[in-house]
Amino acid sequence: MRILVLGGTAFVGRAIVEDALRVGAEVTLFGRGRTGSELFPGVERRIGDRDADDYAALREGSWDAVVDVSGYLPRHVGRAMDALGDRVGRYLFISSHAVYVRTGLGPDSDEDTPRRPVRRDTEELTEETYGPLKAACEDDVVARYGSRATIVRPGKVAGPHDVQNGLTYWVRRAARGGRVALPGRPDQPVQLVDSRDLARLVVQLLADDRPGAFHAVGPAERITMAELIHTCARAAGAEVEVVPVPADAVSPFFPLMRPESMWPTLLRSPARARAAGMTATPMAVTAADVLAWDRGRGEPPLPLGLSPEEEAKLLAGV
Ligand SMILES: NC(=O)c1ccc[n+]([C@@H]2O[C@H](COP(=O)([O-])OP(=O)(O)OC[C@H]3O[C@@H](n4cnc5c(N)ncnc54)[C@H](OP(=O)(O)O)[C@@H]3O)[C@@H](O)[C@H]2O)c1
């Protein structure tokens, strides 16, 4: 299987490339050559810039499938599709669960849940526009490739090399042990997908040449924030006490925390993806692997969450 990956050298795409290589696929990478240039020696690289509509490096070649991990705007996918045409068999677009409406959902919503109205009037990526722009990308890929289009909609992704560090914050904090400040409710549900499970799904869908839309959500078990923190602590051999602190004391969208009004949108059904072969790594394994990766890279400062001093101040008040 010959796979072209648009992206593939940071986190989600990196896991996909690793899994594709694991099953013996022949991979070509397309990117600007800025991120992870030391990765995957021996894998062919084509250099171009999607923001500048520069796909000249893709003029030659054909692939069984393209995996578009770095498309955020209709222009990105439009130009990529213009460049590739029928030289790719299948177009698999990495979208997001942010395409879905945010109200009126019960838990375990499936892939037929209504999406938010698409947006094509902006190229500014914000919390508001990200989902509607991804929805427009989905529509354009399906309009062009029909049954040769596949859409994968990840929920919150976690695992080694996570560039957003949502789980990393809690893994690192829990490993320090003691009283852990939780800005919000301990019973908030969390649904993370291990990047390696997402990658397994993508590669399996390509191997099976399967069309349609699939959630990439996990994990093996449904857990709450408090359970997640305890799982992270166990992975590090630490003891923790989870101490709720007022959510208004910290910024909204604290790592993995969401306002209660959004809780129903945090639980999506993995059924279709699981039936298609998506694996389900236990949270304990994801937490242990993130801990090992974070320690291995020397635990650099994280641009999110609470510093120990900020946390101590909050804990002193409860
Ligand atoms: N993380 C989550 O929780 C989550 C949740 C839902 C959906 N997603 C989706 O997952 C994807 C994010 O994956 P990732 O960033 O981890 O993927 P990745 O494919 O591992 O990394 C991003 C890649 O895009 C390339 N790239 C960036 N800007 C580019 C440009 N202008 N032109 C060409 N290539 C460019 C980068 O290489 P260069 O820098 O060398 O160009 C890099 O290889 C997105 O589609 C996102 O919407 C993520």
Image (cartoon, rainbow, N blue to C red):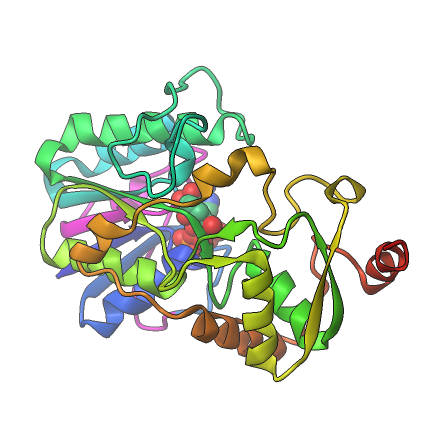
Regarding residue 10, the answer to whether it shows in the image is: no
Q: Quadrant of residue 45?
A: bottom left
Q: Residue at x 24, y 55 (%)?
A: 202
The answer to whether residue 210 is above or below residue 149 is: below
Q: Nearer the viewer, residue 106 or 94?
A: 106
Q: Quadrant of residue 226?
A: bottom right
Q: Quadrant of residue 146?
A: top left
Q: Position of residue 31 (x, y in %)?
A: 40, 50
Q: Residue at x 60, y 66 (%)?
A: 229
The stretch of residues the image draws in magenta is 40-69
Q: Position of residue 186 (x, y in %)?
A: 62, 54
Q: Position of residue 34 (x, y in %)?
A: 50, 55
Q: Position of residue 305 (x, y in %)?
A: 71, 54
Query: Is residue 281 shown left or right of residue 164?
Result: left
Q: Residue at x 55, y 31 (%)?
A: 127
Of the 4 image quadrants, the one containing the C terminus is: bottom right
Query: Is residue 315 shown left or right of residue 190?
Result: right
Of the 4 image quadrants, the one containing the N terminus is: bottom left
Query: Is residue 84 shown left or right of residue 152?
Result: left
The answer to whether residue 143 is above or below residue 33 is: above
Residue 54 magenta-highlighted: yes
What is the number of callouts on the image?
A: 0
Q: Nearer the viewer, residue 271 or 93?
A: 271
